[in-house]
Amino acid sequence: MAIIVLNNQSRFVSAKLYSTSGQVIDVAEVTKKISKVMMSSPQPILESALDQTGLRVSPEVAEDILNRFRNAGLLAYRFFQWSEKQRHYEHSVRAYHMMIESTAKIKQYKLMWDLINSMRKKKMLNVETFCIVMRKYARAQKVDEAVYAFNVMEKYDLAQNLAAFNGLLSALCKSKNVRKAQEIFETMRERVLKEMKSKGVTPNSKTCNIILRHLIECGEKDEAFDVFRKMIRVCEPDADTYTMMIKMFCEKKEMETANKVWRRMRKKGVFPSMHTFAVLINGLCEEGDTQRACVLLEEMIEMGIRPSGVTFGRLRQLLLKESRDDVVKFLNEKMNLLVNEPLCD
């Protein structure tokens, strides 16, 4: 039986297999047959049972099978080994990544590193490979191993770039190791950022945003503000950074500080998003400062950003309560103008 891909645009629907009888079998059918054999055959005889089917796999079939058996690590690994022995077939990067995730999930770390070394020999490794490894180690609370995976990247001919550094921090934060992530950020920041700059890579705000987001979620708001202040010495915060900080101070009822952060953002020329406006307007409404909220809403509309129904509705309710129907009418007219007129010629 030989494989012929008729249409490569669709991953699982359009790929076809021709059997020796000339019958066309689609990928879904091949996947179904292989899955049935895998579920009914004992592992010691699985390879011979698969051989007896006479089916040949394509990258699409392999990826589909690995996805179906992603929680059956060793069974998936047996299929992975069997399929790579077929003539004219090579595993895709995605198939390797799926297998790395499956083996890590069942804590078969030796097999995981065997897969990584196999990818290395085939020159298939990329930064995402190590980000997956770091995530899996961090999720298993193997923090030192996650850091090790980052540190050995260069031995595998991969640069420890910003995406990898962010991947390490994100993995640690998502596994509730925010303190460790912060410690690594402090100890490794100078070395990593210096190396990045020497290679022409400009640090961005995403690195600090990862830590900020998780510190705020954990209620470590003072610590988050400390990270923010250190951040502005390394790189310029983006709209997401400012939005997080403004929202944090609004929730703490520290409107003066929230306004200071807003003014710094505007001074630095960072364009506020709809969400940035919304969190500050909602914070002002919470404090009953409808005058300042109206000024911001008008500024928002003039910038071509239409406020959400929730944001406008909350302010509208407070204005009506204050018997300021004229202001409500004025803001409504402004919003209607934004809808009816194009933002540019």
Image (cartoon, rainbow, N blue to C red):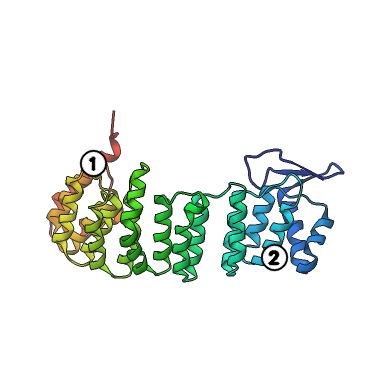
Task: Estimate the x, y position of residue 278 in percent, counting from the top left.
Answer: 26, 54
Judged left or right of residue 238, residue 152 is right
**Image location (x, y in percent) of residue 252:** 21, 67
> Upstream in the sequence, badge 1 or badge 2?
2
Residue 96, by quadrant, is bottom right
C-beta proximity under 8 Å, tags 1 and 2: no
Q: Mark 1: which secondary structure?
A: loop
Left or right, 211 with respect to 128, comes to left
Question: Where does the image place residue 318, in percent across and percent down from the top left?
Answer: 18, 60
In the shown orientation, is residue 110 left or right of residue 204? right
Percent across and percent down for residue 69 are 65, 62
Q: Which mark is residue 69?
A: none
In the rendered structure, which amino acid carries the disc numbered 2? Answer: Leu
Which residue is denoted by mark 1 in the rendering? 303
Mark 2: few, some, or many residues within 10 Å (few <14, many ≥20)?
A: some
The local secondary structure at tag 2 comes to helix
Looking at the rendered structure, the kind of residue marked 1 is: Met
Q: Which residue is mark 2?
A: 75
State the quadrant of the C terminus.
Answer: top left
With 302 as the anchor, is 215 left or right in this view?
Answer: right
Name the foreground residue: 119 vs 5.
Answer: 119
